[in-house]
Image: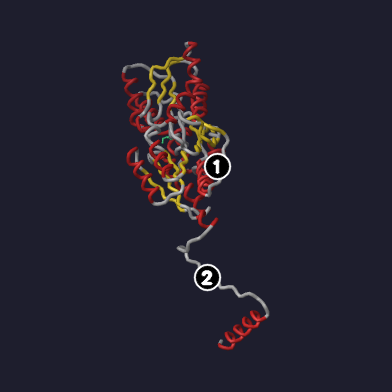
Amino acid sequence: MNNIVVSIIIVVVLLAGAGFAIYKIAPQTPSAAPSGAAAVSRALIGFSLGTSHEERWQKDADLFTARAKELGADVQVLYSGEDGNLQISQAENLIIQGAKVLVVVPYDAVASKAIVDRAHAAGVKVIAYDRMILNSDVDLFLTFDSRKLGELQAAEVVKHVSKGAFAYIGGSPTDNNASLLKEGSMKVLAPLIKSGAITLPVSSFSTNWNPEEAYKSIKGYLATGKKLDAVVAANDGTAGGVIRALIEAGLSNVPVSGQDADLAACQRIVQGLQTMTIYKPLNDLATRAAEEAVLIAQGKPAQTNGTMNNGKIEVASYFLDPIVVTKDNMDAIIITGGFHTHDEVYGKK
Ligand code: BGC
């Protein structure tokens, strides 16, 4: 043993004497202050979500965190549970902690402008994640085109029923997507209303996207003894409330739309209780958001494929494609795609 050590020392001394440089390798400590690319790779990114009710948001946060970590960033995820003021103070907290970029799913499209203002005052960039921050200088918007989505929802319902009494059950008035979805759906429904083919006796928004509100809207209308022929519901949560009210009134064959490919909605679709949902590939959205956040933290330009006006500026945006899911392509899109398993959707055999 001692002989080996002595031999190594002799070799090292000889090599040094022969002009070889001997480098000292410093121990790697995570707290060592890195520089250049290494410093950026450890940037803190804050992910602030103004809601966690729907099944999707936890997936968004997990996928985002995994990709950002892979890229060497640290992520702190904070949920404010439908409390706009709490979301603003959580964002302030993330700024104080040194976040380089905030990725925000705003609870309140209007009030969350304060997050952008405070972040910018501290030199922090802000990405709006799947919900726009209105009248602000937000740096980037990543989303599925909600107008297009609303159009797809109504078009799929109209394929099944194109006359009679329709209901429109929208999302939360505090979420800009709710307006965009309705705008998109009305592109399909308005001409039918105009031609007299359909009427729209129910048209409401649902505070906080609450399924209970959707239930009450439909329940209340049906309690008057009138019937409905179709319902365009803005997401799967509200669709769940709508379908409960329809079933209670013995109307389980009325076409109903949704969005998010929530497990409960996929189950209802294969059972014939819901007509369609929209699968939004969350992995693509979350992964891209993480990649953009890291680029932005490095001071590099974001990659975009469009813009969206938010009332103040044309926001640099990246739009992803939503996919309509019905009974017919459930297996190909949802099961083969790995979003839910066969047993989850159809129940164990
Ligand atoms: C999202 C939907 C979601 C809804 C409720 C919307 O902004 O686009 O996917 O269902 O919020 O959280």
Q: Amino acid at mark 2?
A: Ala
Name the foreground residue: 62 vs 48. Answer: 48
Instruction: Name the element at disc 1.
Output: loop
* Residue 10 locus on image (x, y percent): 62, 85
Classify residue 103 by image quadrant.
top left
**Disc 2 Cβ-to-ligand 1 distance below 8 Å:** no
* Mark 2 secondary-structure assignment: loop
One can see residue 59 in this view: no
Above or below: residue 1 compared with residue 263: below
Viewer-proximal residue among 298 and 161? 298
- For mark 2, what is the residue? 26
Residue 164, picture quadrant: top left
Up-down: is 172 above or below 290? above
Q: Residue at x 55, y 46 (%)?
A: 300
Q: Which residue is labeled 1 in the image?
A: 302
Q: Which residue type carries mark 1?
A: Ala
How far across and down, in percent of the image, does residue 249 sit? 35, 23
Answer with mark 2 or mark 1, whichever residue precedes in sequence. Answer: 2
Crowd band around label 2 with a 10 angstrom C-alpha radius: few (<14), some (14–19), many (20+): few
Query: Where in the figure is residue 32, as x and y percent of width and height?
Result: 47, 64
In this rendering, does residue 32 appear at all?
Answer: yes
- Displayed quadrant of residue 136: top left
- The location of residue 27, given as percent across then percent down, is 50, 70
In the rendered image, the quadrant that contains the N terminus is bottom right
- Badge number at residue 230: none
Between 274 and 199, which is closer to the camera in this rendering?
A: 199
Q: Decide which of 13, 252 is in the foreground and name it.
A: 13
Scheme of colours in the image: secondary structure
Question: Rounded to the nearest whole Å, what is the CA distance between mark 2 and mark 1?
Answer: 36 Å
Instruction: Mark 1: give few (<14), some (14-19) or many (20+) Cα within 10 Å.
Output: some
